Image (cartoon, rainbow, N blue to C red):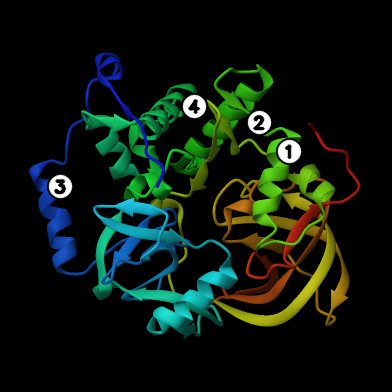
């Protein structure tokens, strides 16, 4: 495994006094939650179970006693990542994740009647570790020794915090850095919580791009080709369509030469959905053309786009679809209000039992053919 250079952070500490550790009451509360197996997990968290598989949590809505999460890292004799004397491998494409789960952890694959789909749902009682990005960033800020990538992630988080004028509590570091499985070539995965904080962060990143900031750079066409080759394992798309969509995004790019993706997540008090209140029914697949009527939720994971003037291009004839949605970060910032898009995905009937509302949405991200593509526009960069 490639070694990660250690970095002296004393100079950073002189400018940024360490944040406080968990108070006695906070530590006691965490201990009680773990003893009672009450884990409040959300998008961007990671969980570890017996046998050391590590899963990334999806969304903010989970069944009682279970967490919707998909395997990301697993112990392997010839793994390319090392932690505490054990070697691990990483799995990314959804098809490979499902195959690995079926082979090694079939008990976690269950049909969920609310989502009308077979999902990976980890029982809370199986969780041995719960990794939270905001808590990990706090640990990085208080650490006396960081390796070079950890230090870079910490500095990037500080840059976002200061330029977006958001509190430390709303920022976290997720991904391989959070669980100690990163290499020198790993990317940086910041997380920002809260709608207003996320909007401020995106504005700050857009400002960096406009002012030709030396630290934060948008992807070049060559960078996008590398990203395209990686994404093509899981999402089938023409390269020019890919460039037209991805070149405008501010939540992804490079910080001091290292890839980053900033995940924007609604805060707990902004999530009005509880498991079972809203139900979903698979209505088959479709390809549509539509105009984006509202893109205000496009920067979040999960993301959504309200649409109008829908025209069905393929699939069983259906009524008008009201929104395009995805649980995957790659579909954030894909279109703006007023733009026309082509999209392919799974049609779902959404029944909101609380507000007595029923409508159709197009869910993208679960199939390699799923996409959202800008129609007939030139790349912005």
Tag 1 residue: 247
Mark sitting on residue 26 = 3
Question: Residue 282: percent from the left, percent from the top?
Answer: 65, 81
Q: Which residue is mark 2?
A: 218
Question: What is the distance, in whole Å, between disc 2 and disc 4 at their CAs?
Answer: 18 Å
Cβ–Cβ below 8 Å for labels 3 and 4?
no
The Cα–Cα distance between marks 3 and 1, rounded to whole angstroms, is: 43 Å
Q: Indicate left or right for 151 with 101 as reference.
A: left
Residue drawn at x 82%, y 50% is 241
Examine the rendered structure and indicate whether residue 222 appears above or below residue 38: above
Q: Is residue 191 left or right of residue 346?
A: left
Residue closest to the eye, 313 or 318: 313
The image shows residue 370 at horizontal and vertical percentages of: 72, 65
| Mark 3 or 1, nearer chain start | 3
Separation of residues labelled 2 and 1 (CA atoms):
8 Å
Q: Nearer the N terminus, badge 2 or badge 1? A: 2
Residue visible at 59% across and 72% down?
95
Q: Are marks 2 and 1 in contact (CB under 8 Å)?
A: yes
**Quarter holding residue 309:** bottom right
Task: Name which of mark 4 and mark 1 comes first in the sequence.
Answer: 4
Secondary element under disc 1, as helix, strand or loop, is loop
Q: In the structure shown, which secondary structural element does the residue marked by tag 3 occupy?
A: helix
* 197 left or right, relative to 312: left
User: Which residue is under mark 4?
Assistant: 164
Please report whichever mark, 2 or 3, sits nearer to the chain's N-terminal start: 3
Using the numbered discs, state the Cα–Cα distance from disc 2 to disc 3 in whole angstroms.
39 Å
């Amino acid at each position: 495994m490639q070694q990660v250079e250690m970095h002296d952070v004393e100079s950073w500490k002189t400018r940024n006094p360490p944040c406080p550790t968990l108070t006695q009451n906070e530590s006691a509360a965490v201990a009680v939650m773990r003893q009672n197996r009450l884990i409040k997990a959300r998008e961007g968290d990671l969980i570890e179970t017996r046998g050391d598989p590590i899963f990334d949590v999806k969304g903010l809505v989970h069944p009682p006693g279970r967490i919707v999460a998909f395997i990301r890292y697993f112990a392997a004799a010839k793994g390319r990542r090392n932690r505490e004397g054990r070697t691990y491998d990483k799995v990314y494409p959804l098809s490979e994740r499902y195959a690995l789960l079926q082979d090694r952890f079939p008990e976690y694959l269950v049909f969920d009647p609310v989502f009308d789909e077979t999902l990976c749902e980890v029982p809370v009682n199986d969780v041995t570790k719960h990794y939270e990005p905001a808590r990990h960033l706090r640990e990085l800020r208080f650490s006396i020794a960081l390796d070079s990538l950890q230090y870079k992630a910490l500095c990037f988080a500080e840059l976002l915090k200061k330029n977006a004028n958001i509190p430390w509590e709303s920022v976290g570091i997720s991904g391989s850095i959070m669980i100690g499985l990163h290499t020198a070539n790993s990317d940086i995965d910041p997380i920002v919580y809260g709608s207003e904080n996320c909007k401020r962060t995106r504005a700050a990143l857009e400002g960096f791009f406009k002012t030709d900031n030396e630290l934060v750079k948008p992807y070049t066409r060559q960078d996008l080709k590398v990203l395209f080759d990686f994404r093509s394992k899981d999402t089938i798309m023409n390269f020019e369509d890919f460039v037209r969509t991805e070149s405008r995004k501010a939540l992804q790019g490079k910080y001091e030469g290292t890839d980053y993706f900033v995940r924007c997540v609604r805060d707990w008090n902004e999530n009005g959905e509880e498991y079972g209140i809203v139900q979903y029914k698979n209505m088959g697949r479709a390809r549509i053309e539509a105009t984006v009527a509202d893109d205000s939720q496009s920067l979040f994971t999960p993301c959504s786009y309200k649409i109008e003037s829908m025209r069905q291009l393929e699939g069983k004839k259906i009524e008008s679809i009201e929104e395009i949605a995805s649980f995957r970060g790659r579909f954030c910032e894909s279109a703006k209000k007023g733009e026309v898009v082509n999209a392919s995905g799974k049609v779902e009937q959404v029944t909101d039992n609380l507000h007595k509302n029923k409508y159709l949405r197009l869910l993208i991200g679960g199939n390699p053919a799923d996409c959202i593509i800008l129609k007939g526009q030139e790349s912005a960069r």
